[in-house]
Amino acid sequence: MFTGIVEEVGTIYGVLTGRKAGSLHIKASLVIEGSKVGDSIAVNGVCLTVTQFTASGFVVDVMPETLNKTNLGELRYGDPVNLERAMSLGDRLGGHLVSGHVDGRGRILSKKQSENAILYEIEAATDILRYIIPRGSVTVDGISLTVVDVHANSFSLSIIPHTVTVTTLGKKNVWDHVNLENDLIGKYVERLLADQGNQGNQPFSLHSSRTKQHSVTDSFLRDNGFV
């Protein structure tokens, strides 16, 4: 698990790719402190396993599924990446609970200065937007961010100067892809509601019409351990 608070911006200094998979060599210093082979590090929000350490960083393998669903396949030599080590029990949860399992890619539609902040509008697929709510949490390239508003095919974010400075967002341009991970709680609540709506041996479906027969109540949240 991660928190979405980027610890360091690393640099890609080696990309080895085959037809469907590959490995990334990443220059970093902070995130390798206390890390060992087999540990997890989030790279642009993607949970990856350290397979090797080098003189100036570490190496991770990237599988076909990862390349298909994230922007890691677009990385080239010299590109910056957001890095975060897996959280430890007792750590401060500065962002929100992040699994490092990316739900899909989004695309930056606009980037505008607004006083001391930068407003981003990010295009996303319907199956991602369904879990995004105003003032809710979303992870963008591994960064825990608060949603400003949600539109028909996109959502907007207001990014403070500190985040722009210490992450890769400030270097992103319009039409660039970003990795998106929805808040875990919304997905688990939907699954529980769908399970309640199923009767007998009916097949499970997140889109079952039965889910509309149930509402999220205080007692439901208590019974299922959310409060």
Image (cartoon, grey):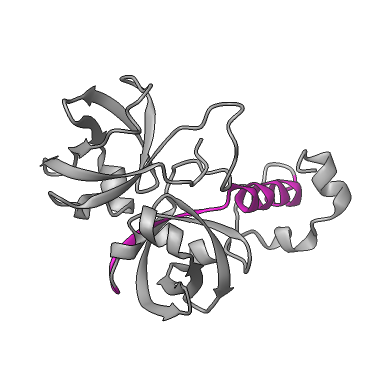
**What residue is at 32 percent from the left and 52 percent from the top?**
70
Stretch in magenta:
174-199
Picture coordinates of residue 150, whole percent (x, y): 56, 74
**What residue is at 21 percent from the left and 38 percent from the top?**
27
**What residue is at 60 percent from the left and 53 percent from the top?**
205
Picture coordinates of residue 115, whole percent (x, y): 48, 79
Decide if residue 42 is on the left or right side of residue 74. Answer: right
Q: In the depicted view, which residue is nearer to us: 131 or 39?
A: 39
Decide if residue 207 is on the left or right side of residue 52. Answer: right
For the C terminus, the quadrant is top right
Residue 182 is covered by the magenta coloring: yes
Q: In the depicted view, which residue is nearer to us: 213 or 23?
A: 23
Picture coordinates of residue 203, whole percent (x, y): 61, 47
**What residue is at 83 percent from the left and 48 percent from the top?**
220
| Number of numbered discs visible in the structure rendering | 0
Q: Which residue of the protein is positioned furthest toward the right in this rendering? A: 219
Residue 120 is covered by the magenta coloring: no
Picture coordinates of residue 130, whole percent (x, y): 57, 65
Q: Is residue 223 above or below residue 135?
A: above
Hey, which quadrant is residue 93 in on the image? top right
Decide if residue 207 is on the left or right side of residue 72. Answer: right
Hey, which quadrant is residue 57 in on the image? top left
